[in-house]
Amino acid sequence: MEQKNVKSYKQKAISLFCPPFRGPGGLLLLLLLMALNACGDENKPVQWWDWTTEEPVPDPDPEVEDPNPKLVELGWANVGDEFGELPNYIDVYKAPEQLQGKKAMAYVAVADVNKVVFAVLGEAQGYNTPSEFYQAKAAAIIINGGYFWDGTSLSLMWRDGELVSPANQVSSPDWTTTFYYPVHGYFGKLADGTYETAWTYTTITAAGANDKTYSYPTLFPLEAGKVPSATFPEGGKLMDAVTAIGGGPVLLRGGEVCNNWQDEYLDIGADGNAPRTAIGYTGTRLIYFVCEGRNMTPDVPGYSTAEVANILKDMGCTQALNLDGGGSTMMLVNGKPVIKPSDGTERKVVSAVSMN
C-alpha cells in the first residue's frame, strides 16, 4: 500500500464512524485504526516481518564412544545404568542372546586396571553370602570367590602381600593309600600393577611356622606322592603378589587356553553345563564374569570351563581363572544381583572378590 493513501484511508474511517469508540461500531473503528496504523504513514516506513529468518538449530550431542568397543562389537550391551551410579571407570555388560552357540544369561563387570581397586574379601574360615559381604564392604562389584568346604577355604587367599589361607594342600580318592599334592590356580595382582594367572602351593611343615607359598608358571601332570617344592614344578618362586584369589582351573595364561582341571585335581564337572564365575585380565581391563545355568532362566544351561575360557579369550583376556561355580555363582552390582542363583537363593561362601 502506498504511504500517500494510508492517511486518506484513516481520515475516511474517522469521518464515517465518529463519534468514535461507542457501541459495536466503536470496536470496529478501533480494530480498523489498528490495522491501518500497522501499514505505516508518511513519517514511518512500513515494517514487514522477515519470514525467512529461522531460529538456529543446535547441533546434536556428539555420540559418546563406549569405553569397551570390543565387547560392543561382540554383541554385549552396556547395562550399567540399570544398577545405579558406578565409578566412571567401571562398566557392566549383558551378554547377547547367544554365546558359544547356546542361549546365554551372562554378565561381565569391566574396569580400568589403572583406577580400580581389586580386593579379596573373607577369611580362612567363616561363611557370608555375597550380600553380607556387600553390607560389610559396599563395593561397586562383588563376585563369589574360591572353593571351600565346611566353612573353610580350600583356595588361596592372599591380601596385602600376606597369606590369608593356602590352597588345599593334599587330596585323595580314598584317604588311605593314595595321596595327591596338586598345585592350584590363582589370579593375582603384582606389585607393578599387572595381573597374572599361575599355580600355587604352600609347603607343609609340622609346626606350620616355616610354611612357604610358591607360585609356578607351569603345571605338572598329577602324580601320586609327588610334593611341590621350591624347585618343583620348574620356575617356582616365592609368592610375590599384592592381592590374589585362588580357584581353578587356570583358563588362560599368556593368551593361551589352559583348562587342565584334571591335573589340578578339581572335581567340578568342568566338562558339563553349569553356572560359572571367572576373573580375567586383558592388559588394560579387569573383567569379572558370571553366567546363569541349570535352566534358572528357561533354556539357559550354562557353560563348561572350556567355553568360559573361549568367551574370555574372545573379549581379549590373556589371563583368566575359573572360580567356584554352581550354586555359589553370583555377581552384585551396587548390591543388586544380576543373575538368578541356581540354589534359588544366595549361597553362603567363604571368600569373595570385589572391585571399587
Image (spheres, rainbow, N blue to C red):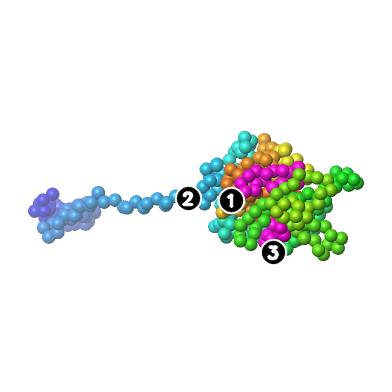
Tell me, yes or no, whether the highlighted magenta stretch contains residue 213: no
Query: Which label belongs to residue 93?
Result: none
Residue drawn 14% across the image and 59% down it: 44
Observer able to see residue 106: no
Tag 3, which secondary structure? loop
Label 1 vs 2, first from the N-terminus? 2
Observer able to see residue 211: yes
x and y, in percent, of residue 102 in the image: 64, 36
Tag 2, which secondary structure? loop
CB atoms at circles 1 and 2 under 8 Å apart? Answer: no
Label 3 – label 2 distance at C-alpha: 36 Å
x and y, in percent, of residue 302 in the image: 68, 40
Label 1 vs 3, first from the N-terminus? 3
Q: How many marks?
A: 3
CB atoms at circles 1 and 3 under 8 Å apart? Answer: no
Residue drawn 60% across the image and 37% down it: 98
**Front-most of 271 and 88?**
271
x and y, in percent, of residue 339 in the image: 66, 46
Residue type at tag 3: Asp
Lateral position of residue 222 relative to residue 30, left or right: right
Label 1 – label 2 distance at C-alpha: 19 Å
Query: Which label belongs to residue 65?
Result: 2
Residue drawn 69% across the image and 60% down it: 240
Q: Which residues are magenta?
A: 237-264
Residue under numbered circle 1: 282
Residue type at tag 1: Thr
